[in-house]
Amino acid sequence: MIRAKITGVIKTLGVRIKDILEYPYDWVTAKRWLSAINTKPLAFDSTEKKIMVVVPHADDEILGIGGILKKHDKMGHKICFIYTTDGRKSWSRNLDEDQMATKRENEANQMCKMFSDAEAVFIKARSMEWIAEEIVDRLHQELIKYHPDIIYVPLGLDINYDHVLNSISLNKALEKSQFPYCLRVFSVQTPIPSDYLNLDCDISKEFAFKKKALEIFVSQNTMKKSFRKVLFFNRLLAQRYNYQLACECIWELSKPTYDDITALCLSGIDLSKTKTITRGRSIKNSCSNTFPPSLIHGISGISRISKRNTAN
C-alpha cells in the first residue's frame, strides 16, 4: 500500500515537472515557427453573412477560432455549428460513453447561447467508430440548407481519428455542392505549417470571451492543461504581431488545395479499419521544418507534416 502511494506520488511529480518544462520548451520551439509566418489581418464587415463551422467535437470550435467567431458575431453574422461526432470517447471518471455524448451535446448548446444568432446541428456519428461515408450525404444536406458564405474546419492532418475523418467528410460533401463559398482551415491539436497560414486576427478584445466559453466544457476537465496551452499559444501569436493580448491565425485556401490536404489525410488512415490512424508514420516528411509541439499532446507531440506543393 505504502509502495503504491509512493509510486503514485512520484508519477504525479513527474507529470507536474513535465508540465512545467513544456511551456519554455513550447516557447523556444514556437519562436522559430512564428518567425516564418507571413499573414495579413483578417477583414470583417457588417454585410449579411452566414458562417458554418464543421467540427468533430464541441470545444474544437472555441479552441481553434473562438475569438474569430465572436468577431463574426459582433458583425451580426449568423453562425451554424455542425458537430459531426457525438464525442462519446472522451474519458471521464464519472460518465459512461452515452452520458458523455449527452453531456457534450448540452455543452455545445450552452456555448451557442453565448452568440447572438447561432444554431447547433448534431450529426452524431459514433466518435472513433465511424467512417467518412456515413455522414457525407447529411453534411451535403446541411450545406445546401444553410448555404454558408464562409466555412471553417479544423486541419485534417492530425493524430485524432475524428479530426481526420471530419476533414475528409467535409471535402466529399463540398464536391457535391455547387455554390460559392470561402473555405478556412484552423488548428486545434496540430499547428498548421507556418508558411501556409495567411490570415491573422487580433482577438485581444475577444480573449476574455474565449476563456469564458472554454469554461463551459466541464466534460473535458482532463484536458484543462491543454486548454491553457492553447491560450498560451494565442498569447505567443500576439507577441509576433505586437497585438495587445491574443491572436488567432488561420489558412484561407481554395477547394483544389483542400483536395490536396484531404489526399494527405487519406494517406495516413485506413478507412477499412476503424480506430486506425497514423501518427505521422504514413505521411512522408519531405521537409525539415519542425512545428511547435502539439498543443494538446505536449513534448511528445512534436509534429512534422509533409510540405506537399499545396500552395493556394
Image (cartoon, helix red, strand yellow):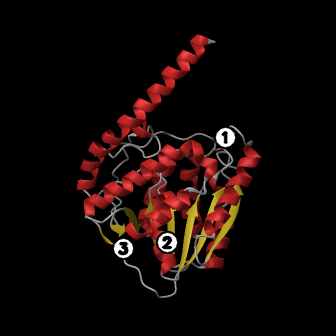
Upstream in sequence: badge 3 or badge 2: 3
> Marks 2 and 3: in contact by CB < 8 Å?
no
What residue is disc 3 on?
Answer: 42
Q: Quadrant of the N terminus?
A: top right
23 or 144: which is nearer to us? 23
Q: Position of residue 155 (x, y in %)?
A: 47, 56
What residue is disc 2 on?
Answer: 70
Residue drawn at x 54%, y 63% as measured from the top left: 171
C-alpha span from label 3 to label 2: 13 Å
Upstream in sequence: badge 3 or badge 1: 3
Q: Which mark is residue 213?
A: none
Residue drawn at x 33%, y 66% as measured from the top left: 198
Residue 83 lies, with reference to residue 294, above or below; the image says below
163 or 107: which is nearer to us? 107
Q: Three-letter amino acid code at disc 3?
A: Leu
What residue is disc 1 on?
Answer: 92
Residue 181 appears in the rendering: no
Q: Three-letter amino acid code at disc 1?
A: Ser
Residue 89 lies, with reference to residue 176, above or below; the image says above
